[in-house]
Amino acid sequence: MKEKSFLWIVLWYVKDHRKTIIMDSIFLAIFSVVFSLYSLQLEPIVYASFLSACAAAIFIVYDFMKYCKKHSELYILKKQVSTGLEEMPSTNNLIEADYQNILHALYNQKTELISKVDAKQTEMIDYYTLWAHQIKTPIAAMRLLLQGNHTEENKELLAQTFKIEQYVEMVLGYLRIDSASSDLMLQNCSLLEIIRQSIRKYAHMFIRKNITLELKEMDCTVLTDEKWLAFVIEQILSNALKYTNSGKILIYMEDEKKRVLVIEDTGIGIAREDLPRVFEKGFTGYNGRMDKKATGIGLYLCKKILDKLSHRITITSKVNVGTKVKINLCSIKTMIE
């Protein structure tokens, strides 16, 4: 809210002092009636009235200046209230002091509540982070056991184990996202190498679903965090494989100069009405309603991570044609076309 205009303050000043104004008007009316009844001379009355008006004007101007000053102090305090109430203006009466005491009590209660919530939140994040790391051990053991026997049943179990690993990685990404700024390690990285690492991770999924991959050569070095950008590319590849039953996935640079990376698939696409909301937390859209296991977290994490990396992500899609995801590695805004 913007600071109020001078006229607005004047109107509020009059409203706040309306009782005094009404009382003074009554007194003035009484004196006028009494003076008229006694037929007193007009000159001394006018002179006394003029002196009284001058004194009243001086007092009103002084009082109004104090009123404006207090309003300004409180307006500034409103912007700084999250840091504390130490700069509260001095009180002029008991009622104002009572209000300030109430504010201080509420602020202390709020601070205490926030501290308790933060402590519980930290404890919960620590627990789930520990759980996510510990669960990796039995998953790795299961993978080793399944890799020992190359049967069709074991291949299917390996695919499901891989999905479990991906969900665990998503949990870790979700837990770390709010502290990602302190976890960032920006450096010049080979974009092609990051992409190849992600592709190798999903190689068996390409083979299993018989999806063709077209990766065009690119000579691009980007200033980014390798781990977090790889996480984003893996999430996009995971979605592309999940919703592409046949055809291919293409990865190429649309604009070498602007460093726009494109990951395009020939999958089922995204409904037009769902596009503006694909980055919302928990939003699954029509495809998610068809796939009961969709979480609506993957693209939400991608957007938040790319925001922190000062990159930009856009999505265009047509139903039954495919989806095109563009990552502008030079941009600082995130939007949907």
Image (cartoon, rainbow, N blue to C red):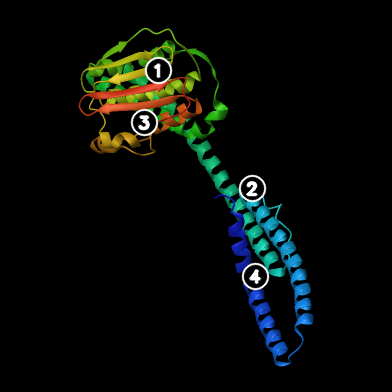
N-terminal-most mark, 3 or 1 = 1
8 with respect to 305 (left or right): right
Residue that mark 4 sits on? 17
Q: Nearer the viewer, mark 3 or mark 4?
A: 4
Determine if residue 289 is in view: yes
Residue that mark 3 sits on? 336
Task: Note whether 136 is above or below 55 in the view shown.
Answer: above
Q: Which mark is residue 252?
A: none
Question: Which amino acid does the dot numbered 1 rest on?
Answer: Val
User: Which residue is drawn at the image coordinates 54% and 32% (left, top)?
Assistant: 179
Task: Note whether 38 is above or below 274 in the view shown.
Answer: below
Measured Cα–Cα span from mark 3 to mark 1: 15 Å
N-terminal-most mark, 4 or 2 = 4
Q: Picture coordinates of residue 229 (x, y %)?
A: 45, 21
Measured Cα–Cα span from mark 1 to mark 4: 64 Å
Q: Are the two marked residues, 2 and 3, in contact with CB atoms closer than 8 angstroms?
A: no
